[in-house]
Image (cartoon, helix red, strand yellow):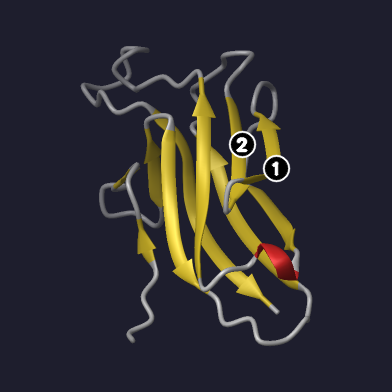
Amino acid sequence: HNKKDFLGFGWSHNFGNKGVWTEGQLAFILFNIENKTNKKTKLNLKFKPYDRNHKKDFELAIYFNDIEKEKINFYNNKGTKEISINLDHAEIQEENVVKFELSNLISPFDIFESPDGRKLGVLLESLSIQK
């Protein structure tokens, strides 16, 4: 059985630059974790919000297998974020889903920046699993 990590629904290119954008309200990452021990496991994420969005309720909620793990409001809270999410042994399955749920998105087109109509949320620069 091949081990693959995939970006699921809700991701968009960064025009040849590093990382991928969330596009729209939902984005998913699917991956396997071998978890034969009870060691502590962390999900490490590095991302930055679309910094032209100044809405007060521009938010990101991160779920691991449908359990809310983190909620971030980006109003006056821009710049690169590096977060570590502790995963309980019981939460980890063979196939796992990280869901990014975003609210109050805008596109570059909405603010007359460019003809790009994508509703951008966060630029995911890296994701790693630490055991």
Give x and y (percent) for residue 2: 33, 84
* As drawn, 102 above or below 34: above
Q: Amino acid at mark 2?
A: Ala
Q: Is residue 52 left or right of residue 24?
A: right
How many angstroms separate mark 2 from mark 1 (CA)?
A: 6 Å
Q: Which residue position is annotated with label 2?
A: 61
Q: Say whether residue 71 is left or right of residue 34.
A: right
- Place residue 114 in its image quadrant: top left
- Which quarter of the rendered picture does the C terminus lie within? bottom right
Residue 61 location, x and y as percent? 61, 36
Please tell me which residue lies in front, 75 or 7. 7
Helix, strand or loop under label 1: strand
Measuring from the top left, give residue 81's x and y in whole percent: 66, 47
Q: Nearest the camera: 97 or 46?
A: 97
Q: Amino acid at mark 1?
A: Glu
Q: Which one is earlier in the sequence, the residue at label 2 or at label 1?
A: 2
Tag 1 residue: 70
Q: Is residue 10 above or below residue 33?
A: above
Q: Are marks 2 and 1 in contact (CB under 8 Å)?
A: yes
Secondary structure at numbered mark 2: strand
User: Mark 1, residues whose alpha carbon is within 10 Å: few (<14), some, or many (≥20)?
Assistant: some
Vertically, is 69 above or below 121? below
Residue at position x 50%, y 18% in the image: 104
Tell me if I can see residue 47 in this picture.
Answer: yes
Quadrant (top left, top right, bottom left, bottom right) of the N terminus: bottom left
